[in-house]
Image (cartoon, helix red, strand yellow):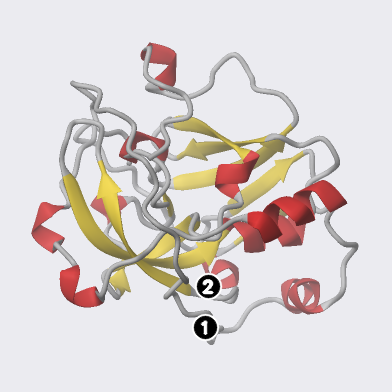
Amino acid sequence: MNPNFPKNAIARRRFLQLSGLSGTGLLVSGCVPAKFTDLVGQKIEPLNQSIQSLMLSQKPVPEFPTSAIEPEKLLINSFNFTPAIDLNTFRLIINGEVNHPLQLSMGEVQQLPLTAMTIRHVCVEGWAAIVQWGGVRLQELAKLVQPKEGVRYVYFKSADGYYESWDLASALHPQTLMVYQKNGKPLPADNGAPLRLAAPIKLGYKQSKWVTQVTFVKDLMPRKGYWVDKGYEWFAGL
């Protein structure tokens, strides 16, 4: 989450037993430029073998039934500042060490397969909430931009100045989403609309809100993450 104002670090939690992914994939209707439609539909060059193997080897964390959703428990931790984002001009920039850098409007993002998952969001402060998130897998975005050989990390830049970095394996996990829905409804601005990160494998402060840029890189830069640079754990896995 962006940010979660960590106070007391909690112990890293082990993964639950693995099971099948309950999220569903479908195309959301809408009018988008032909160039983007062609890009999604055409056979672009395959991902390099190491990234393909990584994507195929990822296994999902068990999810919850929608009846377990706890809407009142998802707290909003922020700087008391929600950036104003014009959806008419908003573009998700995906760049860095990639073969096909892109700038996607929200209409174009929503043309990609929609995945919904009901997972537990865990904050480093000690609270947790079961939430249903809906959006596009980061894997799908990676397939479009084609990361180059040697890419190991992914940086996320947010409209409020927040920044975060993930290892490539976590970013390409099948349950790492770029989210635009919460509990079956459009994502509220306070929760990070138009786009935020969500995943059951990372603590909340890694799950950036208001994401505007995704950058694939080979090496970590000196600035690794807003809270990480203040002394918190970089990996922050569950």
- The residue singled out by tag 2 in the image is 110
Q: Position of residue 99 (x, y in %)?
A: 85, 49
Q: Quadrant of residue 95?
A: top right
- Classify mark 1: helix, strand or loop: loop
63 in relation to 226, above or below? below
Figure quadrant of the C terminus = top left
Q: Position of residue 73 (x, y in %)?
A: 11, 53
Residue at position x 56%, y 83% from top? 27
> From the viewer's perspective, is 78 left or right of 230?
left
Q: Position of residue 175 (x, y in %)?
A: 48, 59
Given the image, on which type of amino acid does mark 2 rest?
Gln
237 in relation to 182, above or below? above
- Classify mark 2: helix, strand or loop: loop
Mark 2 or mark 1: whose residue is earlier in sequence: 1
Q: Is residue 70 visible?
A: yes
Residue found at the far bottom of this picture:
29
On residue 132, the disc is none
Q: Quadrant of residue 56?
A: bottom right
> Foreground residue, 58 or 99?
58
Given the image, on which type of amino acid does mark 1 rest?
Val
Q: Quadrant of residue 220?
A: top right
> From the viewer's perspective, is 81 left or right of 171?
left
How far apart marks 2 and 1 lie (CA) works out to 6 Å
> Foreground residue, 26 or 238?
238
- The residue singled out by tag 1 in the image is 28
In contact (CB < 8 Å): disc 2 and disc 1: yes
> Foreground residue, 219 or 238?
238
Q: Residues within 10 Å of mark 1 (few under 14, many from 20)?
A: some
Residue at position x 37%, y 41% from top? 14
